[in-house]
Image: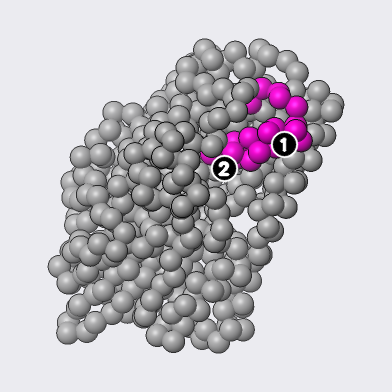
Amino acid sequence: MRINFNGAAQTVTGSQHLLEINGKKLLLECGIYQGRRKDFYSRNRNFHFTPSQIDAVILSHAHIDHSGNLPNLVKQGYSGPIYTTPPSADLADIMLQDSGHIYEEDAEYLNRKKLRRGEQPIEPLYTKQDATRVKQYFQEIGYRQSFEPIPGVRATLWDAGHILGSAGVCLDIEEHGKSTRLWFSGDIGRPGLSLIRDPQLPERADYLIMECTYGDKPHSDPEEAFAELRDVIQHTVARRGKIIIPAFSVGRTQEIVFNLNRMISAGDLPRIPVFVDSPLAINATEVFRRHPDYFDDETHAFMQTGRHPALTFDGLEYTRSVEESKAINATSGPQIIIAASGMAEAGRILHHLKNNIADERNTIVIVSWQAPYTLGRRIADREPRVRIFGEEYPLRAEVATIGGFSSHAGQHFLLKYAQATQTTLKRIFLVHGDPDAATVFQQVLKDNHFNDVLYPPLGDSVEI
């Protein structure tokens, strides 16, 4: 068996891991690379392999950094099954179509500017029509349901506790008379999060491909993050500013809105307008309602009433149309605007940032990890000037970074995850982590008697 690390290798984006087993090729994930603009198109359009030669794909969950390049994979010749859970299939379908629409809109917007400057136009990475073609290849698999993606491999999906339908992937492999269990963590969630069940730990793995996004730090308690967000909003409202929150439409948006509901219901915040400027978030909520079996017991009770707690307070408005989105920027006074994308790389959040980033009364709240070279990272790093749609804007708004809302496991649970299968484990491959986080976590693992821990670079290939 050969493992090729073709994405999310020494970075936290663009997850792609190609397995060569028994003469067949199995791809784990097909995510979008998010980073330097000059690399975005080349890295996402040019695979390290020939898509038509892939035999099967397994998708751990629907987040774009794991699923977002499936349209290009299909466009370039892949026509095999894409195995994933039912919620992930539904979420990926709407998220990919949304991404295609955003890429088209952003290209159109940029091309108008390029035309005025006499520059060559750009093509969108892919279109909404490209994205719609992916759905036909989804093969829905429930948790703990064994299936054979390629000959000699029995696969099982386990609840990863990260977002709705997220999964760790257990592969029991028979090759040349040898039995091997390879476990791919996907994105590991956090115990005790609202809405979804806790992550399931690996069992009896020989090899572990494991994310390490927060390998360098434990998470603060979610209630501390709740209090921090409340204080930031209170201070911004007091100076008559706006609160701008880039957030992933699936998972993070619902969690933030639910916490705002708690704050307003408790009287900690005035009833200011709250805009969720994301058609995708509305569509995602409809997916939630179709899959109540994937939620924890507390959320089950809410779902049985046909209502989700994030949607139940006055002043909350979801905006679908472009006209509604533009109207938000014409309003004044304290308000909260939540919009995608989570790393501020595309979509409506760019327009809200453009219109509000230079006003010192406002606050930009960063609630997600930001990949290097993204606009979100530049804002989180408080660079004095940032480029939005090719133009520079001064960053005068306050920037607040709040890490406790992460749906990724922190260092302590990552260690527990690896320790769950330590007695059988021969080697760990760390992926989906920045070098700083991975270096710290490698040392943590070695201090806890894990002797073979690799952090493979992009394009590395390992035979086991």
Answer whether residue 337 is magenta in the image: no
Label 1 crowd bin: few (<14), some (14–19), many (20+), radius 10 Å:
few
Of residues 375 and 311, which is closer to you in this image?
311
| Residue drawn at (37%, 40%) of the image | 91
Cα separation between marks 1 and 2: 17 Å
Judge left or right: residue 5 versus residue 343.
Answer: left
Of residues 130 and 264, which is closer to you in this image?
264
Label 2 crowd bin: few (<14), some (14–19), many (20+), radius 10 Å:
some
User: Residue 61: image x %, image y %?
Assistant: 39, 51
**Residue 75 higher or lower than 176, as above or below:** above
Amino acid, disc 2: Glu
Q: Which mark is residue 256?
A: none
Q: Which mark is residue 255?
A: 2
User: Residue 203: image x %, image y %?
Assistant: 38, 76
Of residues 44 and 222, which is closer to you in this image?
222
Is there any visible trace of residue 92 in the rendered image?
Answer: no
| Residue drawn at (62%, 49%) of the image | 405
| Residue drawn at (23%, 65%) of the image | 146
Determine the image quadrant of residue 101: top left
Is there any visible trace of residue 190 in the rendered image?
Answer: yes
User: Residue 384: image x %, image y %?
Assistant: 77, 37
Quadrant containing the C terminus is bottom left
Quadrant containing the N terminus is bottom left
Answer whether residue 272 is magenta in the image: yes
The tag earlier along the polypeptide, 1 or 2, is: 2
Magenta residues, as a range?
254-274
Q: Which mark is residue 266?
A: 1
